[in-house]
Image: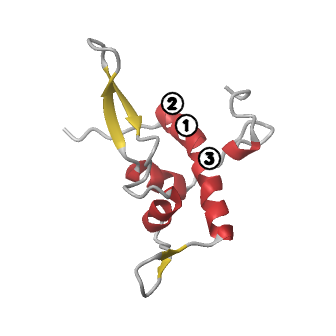
Amino acid sequence: MRDYFADSQTGVSTDGMFEFREEHAVLLRQSCWRTDMLYPPSWPLPGIDGKRPYGDRSYFQIDMASHLGMPYQISSDGEVQTDEVRDAELESLHWQMLTALQIFLLHACVPDRG
């Protein structure tokens, strides 16, 4: 799978390593999961909402920042005050989430709640 994640935006180093951080875990927990039925009568397929992966806002960085405990400032007229540097950092983290999700799906041990 290393070739698939060779793009530098995925967060995978040239030696195939990825640092799975708490930020990734938080965003995976907060992701907007849904189940789609593709071409019924097939099995339901779980997935993350591609348009709004972390919440209801169409600007995904706002949802990410809120989940990570560092929300954007709100102006007196109620508008979110974004900035380019922070947006770029969150977008980079967003691209890493593809790798984080794959690692989670391949290696996570989910505790039995029964």
**Which residue is under mark 1?**
103
Labels 1 and 3 touching (C-beta < 8 A) = no
Residue kind at label 3, given as amino acid type? Trp
| Residue situated in front as seen by the camera: 38 or 2 | 38
Q: CA distance from mark 2 to mark 3?
A: 18 Å
The colour style of the image is secondary structure
Q: Is residue 58 visible?
A: yes
Dot 2, crowdedness within 10 Å: few (<14), some or many (≥20)? Answer: few
SS at badge 3: helix
Q: CA distance from mark 1 to mark 3?
A: 14 Å
Q: CA distance from mark 2 to mark 1?
A: 5 Å
**Which residue is under mark 2?**
106
Labels 2 and 1 touching (C-beta < 8 A) = yes
| Residue situated in front as seen by the camera: 84 or 15 | 84
Q: Residue furthest left?
A: 114
SS at badge 2: helix
Dot 3, crowdedness within 10 Å: few (<14), some or many (≥20)? Answer: some
**Which residue is under mark 3?**
95
Comes first in the chain, label 2 or label 3? 3
Which quarter of the image is occupied by the N terminus? top right
Residue kind at label 2, given as amino acid type? Leu
Residue, x 74% and y 38% (percent of image)?
7
In the rendered image of this protein, does residue 35 appear above or below residue 19?
Answer: above
Q: Residue furthest front?
A: 77
Image location of residue 59, percent across then percent down = 50, 58
Q: Is residue 11 visible?
A: no
Residue, x 49% and y 56% (percent of image)?
60
Image location of residue 100, percent across then percent down = 56, 43
Image location of residue 16, percent across then percent down = 74, 36
Comes first in the chain, label 1 or label 3? 3
Residue kind at label 1, given as amino acid type? Ile
Image location of residue 108, percent across then percent down = 46, 37
